[in-house]
Amino acid sequence: MKLNRLIDHTVLKPDATDDDVRRLCAEAREYDFFSAVVNTHFVPLVAEELSGARVKVCSISGFPLGAVDSEVKAFEARRAVERGADEIDMVINVGAVKAGDMEFVREDIELVRKACGEALLKVIIEAALLTDEEKVAACRAVVEAGAGFVKSSTGFGPPGANPRDIRIMREAVGPDFGVKASAGIRTAAAAIELVEAGASRLGTSSGVQIIQELKGTG
C-alpha cells in the first residue's frame, strides 16, 4: 500500500493565502499525493502549479454546510471544473437526510454530478451528525445518484473520521465504491487504521507529517 497515493492533500482554511496554496502544491508534487484540495477561488492557481504533474486538482461545492440551493452547488462545481478541477467534494444536505427526504437528497447530488461532467464527484455526508441508519441511507443515496465516492466529514463540523463510521460507510456502498475518510487524520497509525476499516482515500492537511512519520524522518 502506497499511502501517499491515497492522500488528498488539503488546505480549506478560510485564511489560506496564495503562498499557502503554492506550498500545498509543492508538497503534493514532492510527496506524490493523489490530489490537492482547495476552495474554488484557488482552482486556477492550483491547475497552473500542478501542470504536468499526476496530482489531481480537487475543489468543493456547497462547503461546508451543504445547505445552499442545489443550483448554487451545481454552478460552483461546474465553474471549478471549467477552471481546472478534476474532482469535486460536495456537501450533502444534512437536514434533508435527517428529515428523511431522500428523494431531494438524490436530486441534489444528481444535479451536481451532471454539472461535474467527466470530473469525479465525492459526496460528504458529515457522518458525525447522522445516526447509523441515516449514514446508511445517505451512502445509498450517493450511490444511487451516480457519484463516485462517499466522504465522511468536512472538518468544519464535529470530530472527523473514525474507523467505525468508515466501516458503516464501506458496508453500505459495497466493496468497489469509493470511501473517503477525512478530518482529524494526523498520524500514520490513524491513517492506516482508517484504510484498514475500508477507506480508499484520505483527506488531510497533515499528509507531509504522515508520510515523514512512515519514513522515520518526521
Image (tube, rainbow, N blue to C red):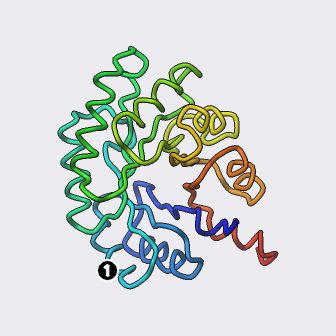
Residue located at (55% from left, 19% from top): 133
Q: Residue at x 38, y 85 (%)?
A: 52
Please determine whether, in this image, residue 132 is positioned above or below residue 12. above
Q: How many marks?
A: 1
Q: Is residue 150 left or right of residue 193?
A: left
Taking the spot 51% from the left edge, 80% from the top edge, the residue there is 29
> Which quadrant: the C terminus?
bottom right
In the rendered image, the vertical position of residue 179 relative to residue 130, given as above or below: below
Secondary element at tag 1: helix
Task: Check disc 1 and give the amino acid type.
Answer: Glu
The residue lying toward the viewer, choosing from 136 and 42, is 136
Q: Is residue 166 left or right of residue 38?
A: right
Q: Quadrant of the N terminus?
A: bottom right
Q: Position of residue 185 (x, y in %)?
A: 65, 52
Q: Which residue is mark 1?
A: 48
Q: Is residue 130 above or below residue 81?
A: above
Q: For label 1, count other residues whose C-alpha is less than 10 Å away and answer few (under 14), some (14-19) or many (20+).
A: few
Taking 125 as reference, is 22 above or below it? Answer: below
Instruction: Name the residue located 41 percent from the left edge and 59 percent from the top edge.
Output: 15
- As drawn, the residue found furthest toward the bottom would be 52
Tell me which corner region of the image, top left, top right, bottom left or bottom right, holds residue 108.
top left
Foreground: 41 or 128? 128
Residue 17: percent from the left, percent from the top?
39, 68
Q: To which quarter of the image does residue 164 belong? A: top right
Residue 43 at x, y percent in the picture: 31, 66
Left or right of 81? Residue 127 is: right
Residue 210 is situated, as x and y percent measured from the top left of the image, at 70, 65
Frontmost residue, 172 versus 52: 172
